[in-house]
Image (cartoon, rainbow, N blue to C red):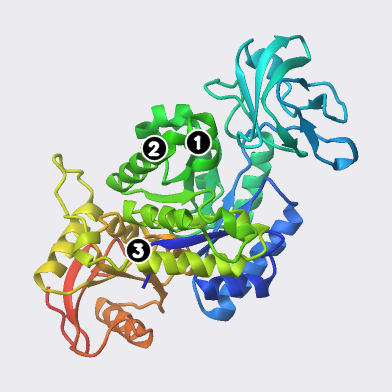
Amino acid sequence: MRRAKILATLGPSSSTQEQIEALITAGANAVRINMSHGTSEEHTATVKAARAAAANLNEPISILVDLSGPKIRTRSLEDKKPVLLETDEIFTLTTRDIVGNEKEVSTTFKELPESVKIGGTILLDDGSLELRVEDINDTDVICRVVSGGLLYESKGINLPNTQLPIPSLTDKDRVDLDWAMEQDIDYVALSFVRKAEDCREVKEIIKQKNKRRFGRALLVAKIEKAEAIENLDEIIDATDGLMVARGDLGVETSVELVPVYQKRIISSAIANDKFVITATQMLQSMIDNPRPTRAEASDVANAVWDGTDAVMLSAETAAGNYPVESVRTMAKIIDCAETLKASQLRKPIKFSQEPTGRTSQALCKAAAYCAKEMMTEKIAVFTESGLMARRLSAFRSGLQTYALTSSINARNQLAMIWGVRPFHHDTSDSTEKMLKVGEKTLLENGAVSDGETIVMMAGRLSGLGLSSSVVVWTIGEDVPRR
């Protein structure tokens, strides 16, 4: 089983139930809904289609909603056609309500004139176009084109090394977050996080609007600003997981630093028991081509070797010509990357220098060492919220983790977590019955065979003596070894 998971963005090329089924069959474990595009009615239909597709295939699927954030964009152009910005010519960004052309274009960011300085750099369309500020008035920012090219409608505007006077959570994001919580999705991604407080505010809203009996939607902090890198440790403490959002990160900092930041973000997330997603341009050429470049294949493999929980496809599956082929190709790359010997992928489990005092941490370490001593590669964990399975995954021990849960929500959410294969099982009223139900579930899904010895463990379970336990279990026997 692949340990690293695949997150596929849905869009015009992949929004129907049939299309999503094809993505899941090809290897997708989770789907992303980008709130920067489309209407809430369209997104509601997409969520329904994703859940129907997963149910029809009897596969778990995680749903991630990506909030737009304060993305600064250009506005409309004449006849909706791209315009050519000539290098060394003057081009104006304005807050006036105009239809743009090759000389000027309006922006959604009304505070632009007061946020930039003469001599400063402005980047358009993920850095494809570069402007230098030459003059500023109340409504206009007059620029010299440093690197020209075609400018399309509604393209992003980046102001590198500039602290903007706007919140990470916009009014639109609040409406979209309310919608996402009504849909009971699994993950919420917050764009343009700059400090820990950005995460705490959204996390509190998620808790207040949570509809689940056990667990809740998990918050993903997108790291794409220089300020986020500076405040990374505090952000990790305040969030549930991270996304290495390499597109804007490369524009807001520098392209050459992105690989350095990627490794730092992934290793810091894992060290703090947080999941992490690596995103943007992983198989970019497959938007238009049926095969990736060699560099793209190496990029995906390196993210896998870094230990990322999931690798993400954006336009490749949302609007590309080869969405299913992109997922299938990514799955093959992951498979090949993970053919390294388990000993090479496995990281040694070390006790923290300072004890955390967390029961879940103690139990996971006990289970991992128990598996090593019993010479088994498999741990089955009973969980209601999914927390214990995520804690076990964060060790990156190379062990195969089977999550057994009576919660469909937890099963779906765990589909995106590294090395975890989640199964749904019926509830039980005693420890002995639960162990047998777990054994039956594993056998029916081909995860274990009769006579095989595995480690079974549990976190905090409601009303069962199995809570906070680790047992050695031989499949087919009646009594576990504690």
Query: Which of the pair 286/202 is nearer the observer?
Result: 286
Q: Report the residue marked by disc 1.
A: 249
Q: Position of residue 333 (x, y in %)?
A: 42, 65
Q: Secondary structure at mark 2?
A: helix
Q: Position of residue 27 (x, y in %)?
A: 49, 71
User: Would you say 44 lies left or right of 418 here?
Assistant: right
Q: Secondary structure at mark 1?
A: helix
Taking the image as drawn, is residue 111 in sight? no
Residue at 88%, 30% in the rendered image: 99
Taking the image as drawn, is residue 424 in sight? yes
- The amino acid beneath tag 2 is Tyr
Residue at 74%, 29% in the rendered image: 108
- The amino acid beneath tag 1 is Leu
Query: Which of the pair 163/186 is nearer the observer?
Result: 163
Quarter assignment of residue 402: bottom left
User: Would you say 415 lies left or right of 91 here?
Assistant: left
- The amino acid beneath tag 3 is Ala
User: Which quarter of the figure is the C terminus placed in?
Assistant: bottom left
Q: Which mark is residue 261?
A: 2
State which tag comes first along the sequence, 2 or 3: 2
Of circles 3 and 1, which is in front?
3
Q: Position of residue 139 (x, y in %)?
A: 78, 15
Separation of disc 2 and disc 3 at Cα? 21 Å
Residue at 70%, 60% in the rendered image: 44
Q: Is residue 71 above or below residue 92?
A: below
Separation of disc 1 and disc 2 at Cα? 9 Å
